[in-house]
Image (cartoon, rainbow, N blue to C red):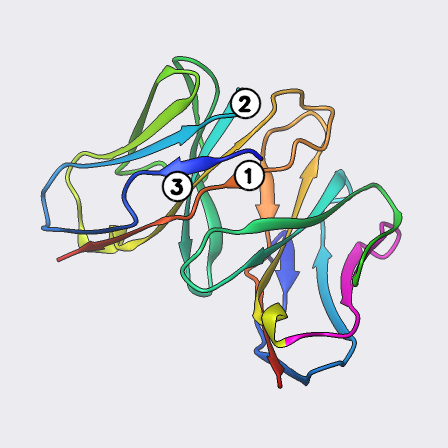
Amino acid sequence: QKEVEQDPGPLSVPEGAIVSLNCTYSNSAFQYFMWYRQYSRKGPELLMYTYSSGNKEDGRFTAQVDKSSKYISLFIRDSQPSDSATYLCAMRASGTYKYIFGTGTRLKVLA
Amino acid sequence: DVKVTQSSRYLVKRTGEKVFLECVQDMDHENMFWYRQDPGLGLRLIYFSYDVKMKEKGDIPEGYSVSREKKERFSLILESASTNQTSMYLCASSFGAQGGANVLTFGAGSRLTVL
């Protein structure tokens, strides 16, 4: 079993929809949770990061962490065609340099 | 803005050639990383460095070596390229304290094809 599981998609939604992207993990030591967006043939760019449990909002993006369920989510409101990309979750335990990545979910927002 | 620059975006090499991938960051980050990204496998850590001349193996170091002679520069070396090393290579950097979020900042990637 992988330490981090992420549905690869593709996920296709109409413009304006609310998108929910999710990752589950098995290591209860993870404390830092990140979401990266990666456009085709580009490097990943950081969208959100969260420490421990809770919610964090930034514009149209909301990140949620539920440590009791070992589940993290990224919500995108009012999705736009420019949101079409692969979304990667990543997480790390305190006291280590090692980040564990999900395999990414491909999102397509249709105009 | 932190910038991580990978010198070569696209490379085509022949089996057995020695390949150098260069990465430079301009934000005085202590940590630097090399990942490879393959469809269905996600990002896998090859090597990372937490200081000049210091390095640690990641999950898939076989067939690779690294060099960090200056804080801002981290090189990935394929001593004898093989076709199974065809991949997207991503360099990243972060601040050093293990207790903080220390998010990774990535370069644009180097797509290597080995024929």
Which secondary structure lies at badge 2?
Answer: loop
For the C terminus of chain B, give its image quadrant.
bottom left
- Which residue is depicted at the point 76% across and 71% down? A20
Residues packed near mark 2 inside 10 Å, few (<14), some (14 to 19) or many (20 plus): some
Q: Position of residue A102 (x, y in %)?
A: 59, 56
Residues packed near mark 3 inside 10 Å, few (<14), some (14 to 19) or many (20 plus): few
- Which residue is depicted at the point 60% across and 70% down? A82
Say which of marks 1 and 3 sits in front.
1
Residue assigned mark 2:
B29
Q: CA distance from mark 1 to mark 2?
A: 10 Å
Which secondary structure lies at badge 1?
Answer: strand
Q: CA distance from mark 2 to mark 3?
A: 23 Å
The three-letter amino acid code for the residue at tag 3 is: Ile
Q: Position of residue A5 (x, y in %)?
A: 64, 61
Q: Nearer the viewer, residue B21 or B46?
A: B21
Q: Is residue A84 left or right of residue B14?
A: right
- Which residue is depicted at the point 58% across and 35% down? B1
Cβ–Cβ under 8 Å for marks 1 and 2 = yes
The three-letter amino acid code for the residue at tag 1 is: Thr
Say which of marks 2 and 3 sits in front.
2
Q: Is residue A67 magenta?
A: yes
* Same-chain status of marks 1 and 3: yes
Residue assigned mark 3:
B60
Which chain letter matches label 2? Answer: B
Residue assigned mark 1:
B105
* Same-chain status of marks 1 and 2: yes
* Same-chain status of marks 2 and 3: yes
Q: Is residue A42 left or right of residue A104?
A: left
